[in-house]
Every structure is written in structure tokens, then in C-alpha cells.
Amino acid sequence: MGRVYWITGFSGAGKTTVGKLLYEKLKTVKDNIVFLDGDTLRQVFGDDLGYGEEDRKKCAMRYSRICRLLSGQGIDVICCTISMYDSVREWNRKNIPDYFEVYVRVDMDVLVKRDQKGLYSGTSVEDDTRLVGVSLSAEVPKSPDIILDNNGELTPGEQVALILEKLGMEL
């Protein structure tokens, strides 16, 4: 069985940055590891779902199922996704044997200041800017395996070090 590292948080929280660094670290000791990002997965699945709550849940369940499929074949998966729904995370815990949940928490005022994609300012080129945690409700993880406060006090590398420490790994 492979392990699934489910990295969740609001848009702009730093999920992808942390996930890519974690992937690079783990890749030095594991051959069977893949990195999946929610934005890329949407494209892989054909951009056939919108950004409303029901479509977001369907999208998240696709990610969960692909993670289970890969981990069942002995592949570790790092999946960076908003997926702020309790039902999705509960499904993961019940259906993915080696599931490790990382919540990248950032204060809303910091997210608005960062606004890398123009989502919080409304200047995004995306047609649909319904944001989880702003105009769509969010169910913040209640029992993640680790919470990373990513308001700028720690570098992404230090955040990854905290994950590895929690897992009892030294790389």
C-alpha cells in the first residue's frame, strides 16, 4: 500500500508549494511517488465540472478515488486540493488505508494580501470566482494529522520539515 498525503487549504494557502517540496524530499528515498494538484487534475478530467458546491464535491471525490487507486498499487500520492468538505475527508479516512491529512491554514487577511491568482480581488481571468471560504461555505478540517500555519512565519521548507517530523522521517 502506498501512502496518500492529502494537502488541503484555501486557494492561495500554499498547498502546491508545500506539496511540491514534500514530493522532492520524498522522491530522494522513494521511487513510487506521484504529485497531483487540483488545478491540473481538473484539466486531466476535461474541465467538465464548474465551481459550485456540488461540482466541487464531485471533483474532490474524483481526486479521492484516483488517490485510492494509485495507493492501492503501492504508489505514494501527494494530492494538493481545496476539497473543504467533511464528507470527502471522512471517505478518505475510511477508504484509503494509509491516509495522512495536512491542513495548510492561513488567515483570510493574509490570503487577500497574497492573492496570487487574482481570485480574492476579483481580477482573475476565471469566469467563475466563487471561492471556498468566501462566497461558498467551507468545512475546515476537524482532525487533520497536522496543521501548518502558513501566515509567513515559516518558509515552505520549514513547513515540509514539520510534516516529516510528524511522520518520524528524517531526510
Image: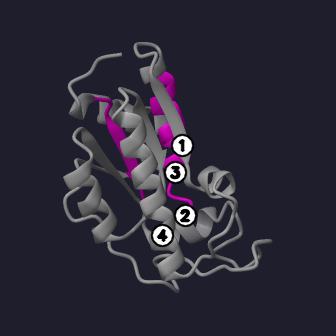
Q: Which mark is residue 11?
A: 2
Image quadrant of residue 141?
bottom left
Q: Is residue 17 magenta?
A: yes
Image quadrant of residue 167?
top left
The colour scheme applied to this rendered structure is one colour
Question: Quick check: 9 above or below 137?
Answer: above
Q: Which quarter of the rendered picture does the N terminus lie within? A: top left
Dot 4 or dot 3, earlier in sequence: 3
Callout 4 amino acid = Lys
Return the residue at label 1.
Answer: 36
Callout 3 amino acid = Gly
Return the residue at label 4.
Answer: 58
The residues tagged by marks 2 and 1 sit, at their Cα atoms, a distance apart of 16 Å
Q: In the displayed image of the protein, which residue is found farthest to the right?
A: 125
Q: Residues within 10 Å of mark 4 (few under 14, many from 20)?
A: some
Dot 2 or dot 1, earlier in sequence: 2
The residues tagged by marks 4 and 3 sit, at their Cα atoms, a distance apart of 23 Å
